[in-house]
Image: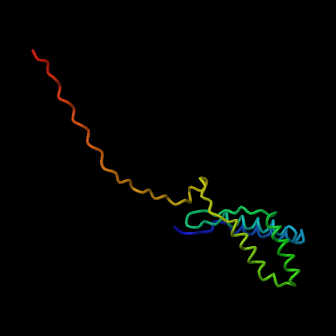
Amino acid sequence: MQSRWDGTVLENFGINVAVYLISVFSFGIAAPWAIVMKQRYVTQHTIVEGYRLDFNGTGGELFGLWIKVFLLTFITLGIYALWAEVEIQRWIASHTFFNRGAAQAQYAQPQYQQPQYAAPAAPPAPPAPPQVPQA
């Protein structure tokens, strides 16, 4: 089974433009929501070993982390920025999972069925011979 990504050029271009516009017009305040939108698109179009990935993070959750990273970077005069991306990537990874639901059955691997090794059933008893009435 191979892994693949099934997004299209047009979809990818559209999502990148949307992320850029959201980030620029909100002066970076809505960047967490844009990042989540992009991550959800990427993971939902990624298939690993027959299973589609999914992402369940929210912009609100990432916004809290975003504020923490910003404040720590500011307080440490930029030193924390070295760890900021790692922390955000860990958050993304912790919200990424395999979607093994029924809707993804077309991508699922067939499940191996363990053979049942049981003693063969006894053959049925032969029918009793017909009884002949005695005279």
Is residue 43 at least partly visible in the picture? yes
Q: Position of residue 48 (x, y in %)?
A: 59, 67
Is residue 18 at least partly visible in the picture? no
Residue at the image position 85 percent from the left and 78 percent from the top: 72
**Residue 113 drawn above or below residue 93:** above
Quadrant of residue 26 within the rendered picture: bottom right
Total numbered badges shown on the rendered structure = 0
In this rendering, position of residue 42 left or right of residue 18: left
Residue at the image position 61 percent from the left and 55 percent from the top: 101
In this rendering, position of residue 13 left or right of residue 77: left
Residue at the image position 52 percent from the left and 60 percent from the top: 109
In this rendering, position of residue 71 left or right of residue 115: right
- The outermost residue toward the top is 135
In this rendering, position of residue 22 left or right of residue 10: right
Q: Position of residue 98 (x, y in %)?
A: 62, 63
Nearest the viewer among 121 and 44 is 121
**Residue 113 drawn above or below residue 16:** above
Q: Position of residue 33 (x, y in %)?
A: 81, 65
**Residue 73 drawn above or below residue 130:** below
Residue at the image position 72 percent from the left and 74 percent from the top: 89
Quadrant of residue 84 within the rendered picture: bottom right
